[in-house]
Amino acid sequence: MQRLLPSLAIFAAFSLQAADSGWINLSKNDSTVGWTPRGEVVSFVSKKGEFQLETEKNVWVASDLKLADFIAELEVKLPKRDKPNFNSGLAFRCTGDKGKPKGYQVEIDARRPSQTGGVYGIGLGGWLYPKKTDKAEFDKKAKGVFKHDEWNHIRVKAVGPRIQTWVNGKPIADFEDSKSLNGYFGIQHHGGGGVVKFRNIRVKKSAASHNGRRSGQ
């Protein structure tokens, strides 16, 4: 019961924030409440609404909030080019209580920037989009969209099996997969040092959602 009360308080706070606009702000104020690192980190802090995550190992930070059908957005800034192989991600519809989550990941990749916006299935079979047959189209859409040393805007919409992504306003992925239809969110530092920054993390239930479930379920 004691462990349940903080979660209820967090959800209530999120609900109040969402009352006017429908958006739930997950990176408000100087607090990381509502987020839990799933491994050893050098630091995970919030400064002026900006999450700063540093670690030597591949670590996911998981949200307490879980949703099924939604729109999620964030801005991310990877370390400068002295970390050319840096990799990060935005996870969603994740399950699992410890360690690496199982779910979907929007790829955020400095070493292969043209893969940013693709969707990887963590514990769900690897790359879901692009598949080999989609690669040429994907490369054309994603080329030049990712901005090194700048803030990049990531957006994902998941309604039922349909998953869509945007990078800096440009549509990237649009496909269907139904392996995981509900779960928490996550932000990633793939390891190797450096600080990855996230800000303006927010989510909104889609019109198809009702109490975390799709209409008709």
Image: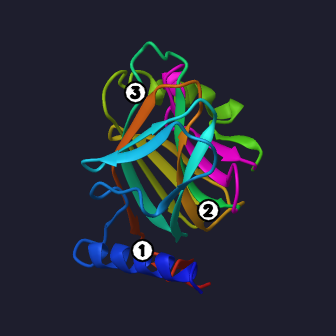
Q: Which residue is mark 1?
A: 10
Asked whether disc 2 touches disc 1, contact meaning CB atoms under 8 Å apart, the reply is no
Q: Is residue 107 visible?
A: no
Residue occupying the point 55% across, 19% down: 85
Dot 1 falls on a residue whose secondary structure is helix
Residue type (three-letter) at the residue carrying disc 1: Ile
Say which mark, if any, is on residue 161.
Answer: 2
Judging depth in this view, the residue of 136 and 168 nearest the camera is 168
- Given residues 54 and 71, the one toward you in this image is 54
**Identity of the residue drawn at 71% across and 61% down:** 96
As measured in the structure, the alpha-carbon distance from the residue carrying label 1 to the one carrying label 3 is: 33 Å
20 in the magenta segment: no
Looking at the picture, does residue 201 appear above or below residue 4?
above
Q: How is the image coloured?
A: rainbow
Amino acid at dot 3: Phe
**Where is residue 43 drawn, in percent x and y?**
47, 40
Front label number (3 vs 2): 3
Magenta residue span: 97-123
Q: Amino acid at mark 2?
A: Pro
- What residue is pinned by disc 3? 146
Closest to the camera, between mark 1 and mark 3, is 1
Q: Are marks 3 and 2 in contact (CB under 8 Å)?
A: no
What residue is rendered at 31% in x and 27% in y? 150
Give whichever of 71, 134 is nearer the camera. 71
Separation of disc 2 and disc 1 at Cα? 28 Å
